[in-house]
Image (cartoon, rainbow, N blue to C red):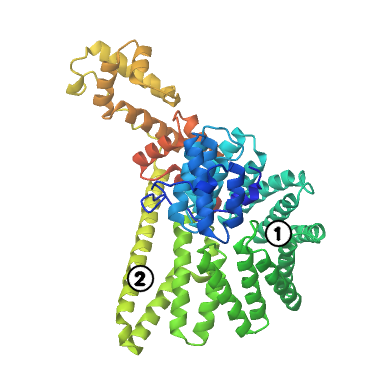
Amino acid sequence: MNFSSQKLLTTITFITLFNSFLGYGQSFQVPDSLEGKTYGELYDSFMINVDSINQKAEIYAKTYLEKGLIEKNKIQTAWGYYLLAILNKKDSLKSITFLDSVISYSQDLNDNYFPAVIFINKGLIKERQGLFTQAIDNYLKAIEFSKRSKNNHLLYTTKHNIALLKRKLGRYEEAKSIFKECLNFEAKKVNRKINDSISYLITLSELITTYRFNKEIDSAFTLINKGIQYSKKKNGAYLFLLEDGIQDYHNQNYESALQKINSTIPLFFEVRNEEFFESYNLIEAYLYLGKTYRALLDDVNSIQYYKKADSLIQSIDYVIPENRAIYIELINYYKFLNEKENQLIYINKLLLVDSVLNTEYKLINDRIIKEYDTPKLIAEKEQIIASLEKENTKKSFQNIIISVLLVISVLGIGFYYYKQRLYKRRFLKLLEEKNIDNQKKDQSNDGPSGSSSISKETLKNLLDKLQQFEEKQDYLKPNLNTKDLAKSFGSNSSYLSKVVNSFKEKSFSSYINDLRIDFVIDKLKSDAIYRKYTIKAIAQEIGFNNPEAFSKAFYKKTGIYPSYFLKELERQTDVN
C-alpha cells in the first residue's frame, strides 16, 4: 500500500478502549460484485468514498477485512481494521478498538508502518485528552517499533511529537534540542517530494514558536526570515507569516501585525482539512488578533477574536497554558461591563483550564498561573454567585451545583497544600537529623528470645559480621539475599534471618533498604555532585534494581519521595 505516512499519522482523531458499543462483530456477507476484487482495488474504492459516501466506504472496508480474515493474511487483516478506524475517525469508541486490532495483528510482523504508526496516533490522542503519561507510553512504543522496522520517518515523527509535548510542559530547552535534531533529518529530504518540504517547514515553525515561548526573540526572528524565504510558493508559508505578525505585535507594530495575521486566516481555512493542519496555529492567530486589537483599544474586535478562539478550543477540546490568556481577557472585559453572567461563564472555563493544567501538566512552571491565581478566582466566583442569587432566585439550582463544585475545589486545594506542608515537615526533619546509624541495636549475646535457638558463639559471630557488613557499606551491592549473605558469613539463611528479625527488628529486605536509604540521605546532604544524579542513577548506585523500588523504599522510610527530597535540597542550597 503506497499512501503517504503523513496521511497515516493524522487520519484518526479520537480513540478509547471500549468494545461493547461496536457493531462490527456481527457476520458480514461480501457482496457478489466485490468477490473478485483485489486488496488494491478495494482500498482505492474505499478512499474514493470515505469522505463522501460512508455507507459505500464501509462495505469496501468490511470486504477488505473479510478477505484478509478468510485468507488468514495478518498484514492485510490489519489494514482492514485500519480502514474501519479511518471510517470511524469521529467515533472514538469504535476507533480505539479497530486501532488496537491493528496492533494485535501486526506487532509481530516487522512491518514498515504497523504498528508504529498506530502508537503515534494513540499518543496524539492521549495528548489531546491531556493524558500525557499515556501519550509518552505510546510514543515510546512507536519509537521501539520504528527502530525495529528501520523507519526513520516514523522515528523522527515520534520525536517531533515528544518535542511538542515537552514544549507544552514548559521544558523549552529539551524541546529545542529535539526539534533541531528533527530539522536536521528533514533537511536531508527537502525537495524530494512536496510532503518533505511541508514536514521541514512545520518543524521549522515549531522551533520558532519554542524560541518565542522561551523569549529568545532574536533566534526566533532569524528563523522566521529563513522560513519566509524558503516557503515562498509552498504550502506552509502562512505559518511564518503568522509568526512574523506575532513578532510585530511584540514590537508594538500593531497595524503591521493586524495585516499579516489577518491575511493568514483564509489560508488556514484553505488547508484545514489537510493532514498537516494544526488547530492550535489558528487558535494563536485568533489570540494575537485579539491582543492586537486590545492594544489598539478596539474592544469590539478584540472580544470577537477571543470568542472565536474560545469556540475553536471548545470544538476540539484542546487545553494548553496559552488558553488562559484568552479567558483572562474575556473575564476582565465582562467585569468592566459589570455583566456578571458572562463573567461567570469565563471564570468557569478558566478554572477548568487550570484544573487540567494542575492535574496533568505536573511540570508546568508556576508563572503560567500567577497572573490570575486560583484563590482570587474562587473569591470572585463566590461574590458573583452571591450577587446572582439576589438578582434571580429562579437560578438557585444552578447556584447550588456551582457551590458544591466550589467546595470540592477548595477541599482539593486544601488537601494539596496539606500534603505539601506534611512533606515539608518530613523533609526538614530529615535535614536536621544527624547521620546516626539507627540500624545497630543492642548486640549483647543475651539478645531477644527469637534468637535463643542459636548458640552464643554463632550469634556473636553473626552480629560481628553484620557490623562489618554495615561498616564496609556492602549493603550497597545489588541483588542481596539472605542465602548468599549468610553463606559469605559462614552461616545459613535461617540463622541470619532470625538475627536480623530479632536484633534489627525488621525483615531482611527492610533492613537492607533502610541501610541504603540512610546512606543516600547522608550522601545527598553532603555531596552536591551526587544531587545532580537522576533518580535512576542514584537507585543503581545504592543497589536497587529499578527507580520504582528505590522510590517506594525511600517513601516507606521517610514519608516523602526522593524526587521531592532532591528538589527541596536544591532549593535550600539556592537560598543559602
Nearer to the camera, 177 or 267: 267
| Residue at point 59%, 80% (across, down) | 304
Which residue is nearer to you in this view: 233 or 400? 233
Which one is in front in this view, the residue at disc 1 or the one at disc 2? Answer: 2
Residue at image position (71%, 69%) is: 264
Quick check: 87 above or below 406? above
Q: Position of residue 366 (x, y in %)?
A: 52, 61
What is the distance, in whole Å, between disc 1 and disc 2 at their CAs?
39 Å
Residue 448 shows in this picture: yes
Mark 2: secondary structure: helix
Callout 1 secondary element: loop
Q: Kindly check if marks 1 and 2 are in contact, taking CB atoms under 8 A apart as contact.
A: no
Quarter where residue 240 is shown: bottom right
Where's residue 156, x and y in %? 65, 44
Q: Residue at x 32, y 28 (%)?
A: 440
Can you identify the residue that label 1 sits on?
216
Upstream in the sequence, badge 1 or badge 2?
A: 1
Placement of 300 over or under 548, stated as above or below: below
Callout count = 2
Relative to 275, is 411 on the left or the right? left
Foreground of the two, 194 or 198: 194
Answer with left or right where residue 574 lies relative to residue 436: right
Crowding at label 1, few (<14), some or many (≥20) Cα neighbours within 10 Å? few
Which residue corresponds to mark 2?
A: 406
- At label 2, the amino acid type is Leu
Q: Position of residue 21 (x, y in %)?
A: 37, 54
Q: Amino acid at mark 1?
A: Glu
Question: Label 2: how many residues lie within 10 Å, few (<14), some (14-19) or many (20+)?
Answer: some
Position of residue 228 in the picture relative to residue 132 (left or right): right
- Is residue 166 in sight in this rendering? no
